[in-house]
Amino acid sequence: MTQTTPSLTLASARNLLAQAGQDHLLTFYPQLSSDPQRQLLDQIASVDWAELARLIQTHVLKKPDVHIPDHLEPAPFYPNIPPQDLAAKYDQARHLGIDLIRQGKVAAFTVAGGQGTRLGWNAPKGTFPATPIRKLPLFGCFAEYIRRVQDKYDTTVPWYIMTSPVNDAATRQFLEQQHYYGLDPANVMIFPQAMMPAVDMTTGKVLLESPASIALSPNGHGGSLKALFASGAIADMQQRGIEHISYIQVDNPMVRVVDPQFIGLHAIDNAQMSSKMLPKAFPKEKLGNFCLDHGRMTVIEYSDLPDELAEQRLPNGQLRFLAGSIAIHAIRVDFVQWLNTRPGGFGLTFHRAEKKVPFIDTATGQPVKPDSLNAVKLETFVFDALPMCDTSIIYETSRPDEFGPIKNADGHDSPATSRQFQIERAARWLESQGVKVPRLPDNAVDAVIEISNLTAIEPDDLDDVDLPEAIGRGREVLL
Ligand code: UTP
């Protein structure tokens, strides 16, 4: 149904904006036709102007003080391969994880509301072709993973996808066109996150992207914890008996969308929100650092971790602050419910990001394309919920098995590196089954191999697959 009346009257919009010192946003209103007028009023209605006015003082007109705790300790973690004294616990946890999945108590959740500016793909990032041979889009990789888990454990894993108002329609249309990659649409729920205005960093004025539109951008992946609740997704989960959310980003085709070992360790320790980590390859690798601040789990961004801490090593040479965040989490449904209903409000702090944001000059009506950073965007980060947990565990995953993100158009974390990591993983899985894989003198795989998630999500799944004895040099092999 088309909405015909705006959610706010012009008089109330004027009032709100005047109080917030943002009345310039209505400069072009009288010249607009009725649809764009309504759109602008709707946008104004969607912003919490009182909160924004506070944030402009604390985060835009000055840089917020980033408080680095004095007594940071490295966060303990469950190693990828269990030491002998933990082998029984890992086993028990894996079985618990499988039971939870079998009982339909685990949902998959993909945050896909980001703008993907670094990749520069002119469509939702989840539609980006990610696999080496089929060029299966990222959403397809996750959907096939979920189908495989559903088959393997004879269960349903509902899939929740967070979009933003910018890519929501395109995401829905894409998944419909792809027939949800074989998933039952009744078990796929798509909902948008909220937006925040971009603000001129010297004047504190909110920017207009066009005469009828505020320059809005998604409010960060931390917005997912609010949007899950506001959209009714949490209520839907509760009604389905879901207890745990498996949180993944949209950019990694190699991710274990639902991992029994990780869910099991998180559940067995009664954690509210847990995380997977990668051992950092070098001290200042661009990953958040899992630390303890007076016993509370916290993530310190790579740029904020003091050099002397980043460089510290244990007697065996290993980095003392080793655990890097790759934004994979297990989150209890009742923790998200609590975050949204607790006394004192939601409580994730905003972060300041300086950006180049094109805008309309309200004095001249002309568009301006800035050459330098001119605006502040305000975002919350999902990992800022970790210090609010009483218990939060970290589980180390294996980089070559689970990490092939597509973030940049080229260079590191790009489609090319992800493709190479996917081929390398497929080759190792085949070699573990005795298949001879051609390799070059530098050990690189001399073939293009793709294993669909429908075929195998772990090497043992290949036990039942009819495999070739050897792969020919330079061949393409799709399993
Ligand atoms: P990134 O930090 O990689 O940001 O997001 P991005 O917006 O996708 O990409 P760039 O920085 O513009 O190139 C990490 C994950 O968080 C999601 C993204 O979709 C991605 O899965 N995200 C990010 C949201 O869902 N909402 C946001 O507001 C920001």
Image (cartoon, rainbow, N blue to C red):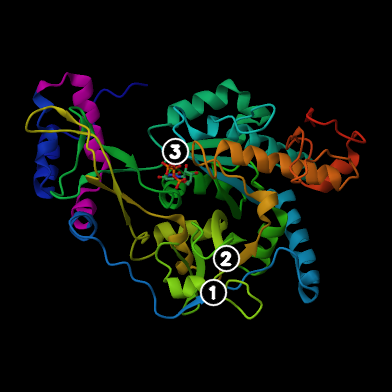
Q: What element carries label 1?
A: strand
Q: How far apart are marks 1 and 3 (CA)?
A: 31 Å
Q: Which of marks 1 and 3 is nearer the N terminus?
A: 1
Q: Residues within 10 Å of mark 2 (few under 14, many from 20)?
A: many
In the rendered structure, which amino acid carries the disc numbered 2? Ala
Q: What element carries label 2?
A: strand
- Compare residues 242 and 68 and report the one nearer the observer: 68
Q: What stretch is highlighted in magenta?
A: 31-54
Checking the image for residue 74, the label placed there is 1
Residue at image point 10% right, 33% down: 362
Placement of the C terminus among the 4 image quadrants: top right
Compared with 24, 293 (above or below) is: below
- Residue 291: which numbered mark, if any? none
Report whether the residue tagged 3 is closer than 8 Å to ligand 1.
Answer: yes
Which mark is first along the chain, 3 or 2? Answer: 3
Q: How far apart are marks 2 and 1 (CA)?
A: 8 Å
**Magenta highlight on residue 52:** yes
Q: Do the residues labelled 2 and 1 touch (CB within 8 Å)?
A: yes
Determine the secondary structure under disc 3.
loop
| Residue that label 2 marks | 323
Residue 475 spot, x, y in % from top left? 79, 28
Above or below, 134 against 252 in this view is above
**Which residue in the protein does label 3 denote?**
116
